[in-house]
Amino acid sequence: MDFGTYQTLLVEQRDEALLVTINQPASMNALAAAVVEDLHALTGVLADLGTDANWPVRGIIITGAGEKAFVAGANIVEMNTMDPAAALAYGRRMHDVTLRLEALPVPVIAAVNGFALGGGCELAMACDFLYASANASFGQPEVNLGLVPGFGGSVRLQQRVGIGMARELIYTGRRIKSAEALRIGLVNRVLEDNAALLDAALATIAEIASKAPTAVANVKHAINEIAGLNVVDGLEAEARSFMKAFTTEDSVVGRAAFVAKSAPEFPGR
């Protein structure tokens, strides 16, 4: 499938995975307006594929070009000329990108290969999970510029690490290395180098690709819905998700294969 051509992104299908590389290494892949527009266009193409399981890929990996940065942050030079209305539009454009990533029916992995600061950390947190190289670093340093997170950091950081740790990181603007990010639950895995990082992300997509596509799409939606709910409402959302699974052919095939002690061949319906 043709996912489009972009000025600032490299988009390549690798077996079951779609590899998206932010390709602006001279600026450490900062989220300039052109990058944001390309991400918005690509996520629009992906959103148009729908939210069911009938997809040309089984997962997406987002990474940055070069050896230094995933995304070093927003483009401060451009932001320096923004008035409040322009800043609001800029932030909301990235909100669209992150919400689209969360709504996709396939997992999205952030392969963080260096700096993931400010907007870079926020983009990574919109992915289902984060893998990081040993030299990666994370932070929300907006307070150093008299600013605050604008691409979702105030929301998603506390969901991942808890409100107390999120407050400390955001109030101080402190930068943490990948080992500390792993300890506090911001990242799932730390890999030795960029090659191992990409291999691990591809291997995880391949592993997920062997599972029922409808089940993965269903449970991703449920987990995102439940994240903002109390226990009672969360259990009700889970019950709806559980019931929906029983309407799929994948569930019929999977249960029958288990009983027959055979390997399931999921139709993705």
Image (cartoon, rainbow, N blue to C red):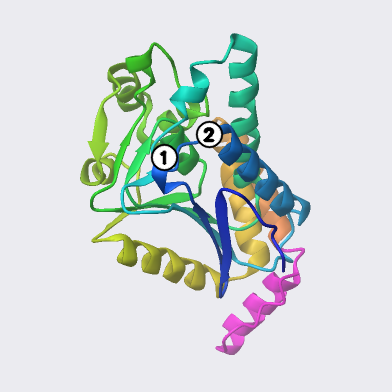
What range is drawn magenta here? 246-269
Is there any visible trace of residue 235 in the rendered image?
Answer: no
From this view, report whether residue 37 is shown above or below residue 200.
above
- Point out which mark residue 237 bears: none
Determine which quarter of the picture holds residue 168: top left
- Point out which mark residue 27 bears: 1
From this view, report whether residue 21 is shown above or below residue 151.
below
Q: Residue 92: x, y in percent?
A: 63, 26
Q: Are marks 2 and 1 in contact (CB under 8 Å)?
A: yes
Q: Residues within 10 Å of mark 1 (few under 14, many from 20)?
A: some
Q: Mark 1: which secondary structure? A: helix
From this view, report whether residue 144 is shown above or below residue 203.
above
Q: Residue 264: x, y in percent?
A: 61, 82
Q: CA distance from mark 2 to mark 1?
A: 9 Å
Please name the residue that numbered disc 2 is placed on: 32
Q: Residues within 10 Å of mark 2 (few under 14, many from 20)?
A: some
Q: Residue at x 42, y 63 (%)?
A: 201
